Image (cartoon, rainbow, N blue to C red):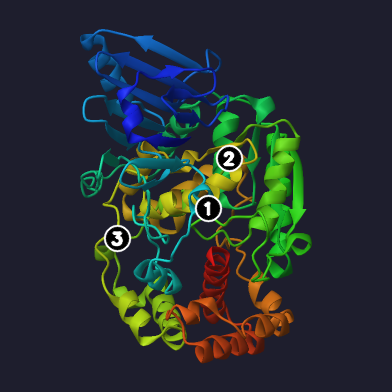
Amino acid sequence: MLKATIALADLAFDPRWDGQAVAFGASRIEPFAHPALETLLVRTDGQWFATVRERRTEGGAPARQLDVDAAEFEQRYRECLLWPLDYAMVEAAQAGCRLKLRAGVFGALPVYARATDDRLELSWDAGDLTRAPTALDFEIASHRLALHTIYSARQIAVGIVMLTERASLSVEPGKASYHYPPPVQVTTLAQARERDAWLPSFAAQLREAVDARPFVAARSALELSGGMDSATVACGLAAIAAPRSSLGILLEGETRPPQLKRRGAIVERLGLHDETVEIAARSPSLDLRPVPGQRLGFNQEYYLEACAALWDRAASLGCDRLYTGVGGDELFPDYLHELASEGDTLEAQRERTHRAQVDTLLTPRAREAARGLHSFGAPAGPVPATALAAQACRAADIARRGLWPVNPLSDPRLARFCHQLPLEQRRGRALMQRYLQQQLGEDTFPAGYRKETFEQVFPALIAAQAGMLTEQLHECALADLGLVDRRGVMALLDAVAASQARAPTAVLVSFLWMERLARQWG
């Protein structure tokens, strides 16, 4: 939500809003300039804070500077800490040149930080911080190669942290410390209700999540895949306004006909102006050579080419807000005590299959690092960690196009409501499915609905480009770093090219992404 280069000694100067940034000495804090956001600078004797936050209403001044007494300063400060939407906040004490950076609960556009003895660099675009020499964190890289989802302050680049939701980073000359928030309370299941009593409550919670931010139909685009998550967001928007623009990526193979049918039904029934991108025309790049001027982020976005075409189109239509279905996968969890056996779950089966492939890829040292229980992950928060990680994968690329990501299904109040539902309402997303049937007709998401996925894209693509990859992998940066065994890499590539099986493909694709990142950092 902001970028900054701060010399800690400059904190002794009084800050001012210069029309584009908070300036003090030679240092600057630049907010992400966007109609969905506002900036507030509040000053009093010896201290000040600046916050960039999501607007609760449309319009108004993009930035304000206030000089207040100590009592009003405390009032404004508490108001910002309790801001109901997303925010990033910088607070400074001029005596001692001390600074604290805080984040809100949503994690929509995370801020990354690199601190040295006397300087702090901040950016919502992690690539800005890798212009200086950068090294891979061996432990984080090992976990990533093992397909472990990590939401953490500690990042894959040594010396760079991400401000996770509700966390704070304190910096003073010669010292920096990171503070995680306390974990949220364990979910308690709600008391039983009649089956049909849950549906209006879900619709009301969804409406609140969608209506939390001002909706401007002419400037808002909706990612519409044809799946339940994006369809739910579309219906939630339709309940408060008339959404206009939808965009989606069309898949190939056996999932294409049902995807087309569902998308067509949703578009027709909600009156959307729909545009699509063919995944076949925007296949993911497997070229491991760094692209001049392109800096990869720290989180894996596997279908960036097709997504980028979608986001570029949204921007060309004059849109500045992008509504997504991110967070839908996390709304209806199965809890361990509800499962007959943890070993029978699909998740556990995939874990065993992936581990066998990972073991052939990683060196013994990396394998041991990946199997260790990590103690650096952020504590459980109001928004599930996997949803926050998914947002971090995409947010910077969306923001570079002048779009603000809005993820209603990641709303913490909606998540809390869904997590406490009885099992029969959560299993198979039963409540969401009944909501969509009510809004769109029972034929749109019937019983037995199968979710569309991108899983079939990479196996055939890798098989077709195996020769190029073999040639490029004669030199392997991750092998030189001691993370992977080169013979294991080539064996995995041969296995994917021959079988096009999904489990080894997932492991190989994760390796290819990280190999390209390692080559970019040199």
Q: Is residue 472 left or right of residue 168?
A: right
- Circles 3 and 1 in contact, beta carbons < 8 Å: no
Q: Earlier in the sequence, mark 2 or mark 1?
A: 1
The percent position of residue 115, horizontal first and vertical second, equals 35, 46
Q: Earlier in the sequence, mark 3 or mark 2?
A: 3
What residue is shown with label 1? Answer: 131
Residue placed most toward the observer, 55 or 227: 55
What residue is shown with label 3? Answer: 335
Q: Is residue 410 above or below residue 151?
A: above
Residue 306 sits in quarter: bottom right
Report, in whole angstroms, how far the alpha carbon at label 2 lies from the one at label 1: 20 Å
Residue 90 visible (yes or no): no
Q: Quadrant of the C terminus?
A: bottom right
Q: Is residue 339 above or below residue 108?
A: below
Report, in whole angstroms, how far the alpha carbon at label 3 lies from the one at label 2: 35 Å
Report, in whole angstroms, how far the alpha carbon at label 3 lies from the one at label 1: 43 Å
